[in-house]
Image (cartoon, rainbow, N blue to C red):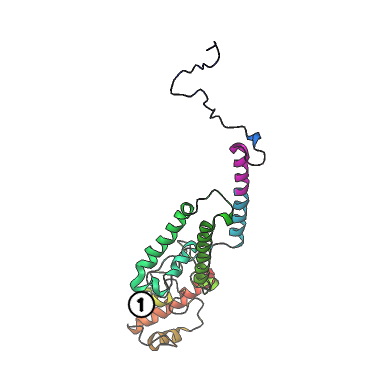
Amino acid sequence: MHKGKGMKFVGDSRITADRTSKVPKDYSEYPGRTEAFWPNFLLKEWLAGAVFLVGFLCLVLAHPSPLEGMADPTDAAYIPLPDWYFLFLYELLKYQFASGDWTILGIIVIPGLAFGGLLIAPFLDNGPGRRPRQRPIAVGMMLLALASVIWLTYSSAAHVDWEERAEQNKPIPPGESVVDQNHPGFAAYESSCLGCHGGELEGGAGPTLVGTEHSKEEIMDIAVNGIGAMPADQFQGSDEELEQLADFIIETSEAAAEQE
């Protein structure tokens, strides 16, 4: 064997002399196929996020969230609704197979299977391609989930008159309540009328009393004899308490109407 030929010297006999370098290749070797994370990729992400944020702020300004009054446990006619991103689960519980004796299916089993399917979709369809037609399982499951959420959300919100709902349950800032709880007629109103007409006379199961056109005598007669869907004998008390109740309703109604 000639000197310098056929012999290779390495520091460790376990490491092959033909070991290739692990240094990543320069981005310029892949024009149009990759780019530097900083600053190129992050700049695009920030620009896309800024456009989305501005659009979202414009939407909020154009269509403000309808605020309602504080929760009133005495209002049995009020039907609470979850936030919009939970409306599809709320609608799901209206179906026979997900309510009643099958509530567990509606609140745990079906949502669990749906979200679990989305989690394992990438593992079921893990081919090298990234085009939608190359990943039929993952794309199909995502489209099915998206269509289901959109349809259930629309079905849940379509029958709700949001303007009327907001009108009947207006928020009253703290400290600006028109109800004088020290009024002699408040106790009679609380025990006989509050459950149907609301804590601020805003209405509920019964009509609103704000701006009522009934006179004091008419209010006293209605409280005893009823009117329309309101049954008789809703008020149980003395004549003096009845008169105080009518005074309270008229005074509070006028104050609430002026505040509006």
Q: Residue at x 51, y 77 (%)?
A: 211
Q: How many marks?
A: 1
Residue 219 appearing in the image: yes
- Residue visible at 54% across and 55% down? 135
User: Tag 1: residue type?
Assistant: Ala
> Which residue extends farthest top?
3
In-front residue for pair 133/121: 133
> Is residue 41 within the magenta segment?
yes
User: Is 10 drawn above or below residue 138 in the view shown?
Assistant: above
Q: Quadrant of residue 133?
A: bottom right
> Would residue 143 be found to the left or right of residue 34 on screen?
left
Disc 1, SS: helix
The answer to whether 169 is drawn above or below residue 245 in the figure is above
> From this viewpoint, is residue 179 visible?
no
Based on the picture, tell me whether residue 60 belongs to the magenta stretch.
Answer: no
Q: Which residue shows up at 44% across the image and 67% down it?
A: 90
* Range drawn in magenta: 32-48
Residue placed most toward the observer, 167 or 135: 135
Camera-side residue of 243 and 257:
257
Image coords of residue 115 (percent x, y): 44, 58
Residue 175 lies, in percent from the top left, at 45, 61
- Which quarter shows the C terminus? bottom right
- Circle 1 residues within 10 Å: few <14, some 14–19, many ≥20: many
The residue shown at (37%, 67%) is 105
Q: Main secondary structure of the magenta part?
A: helix
Residue 259 location (% of width, % of height) = 53, 68
Where is residue 163 shown, x and y percent of the image?
55, 71
Residue furthest front in the image: 1
Q: From the viewer's perspective, is 85 left or right of 48?
A: left
Residue denoted by label 1: 188
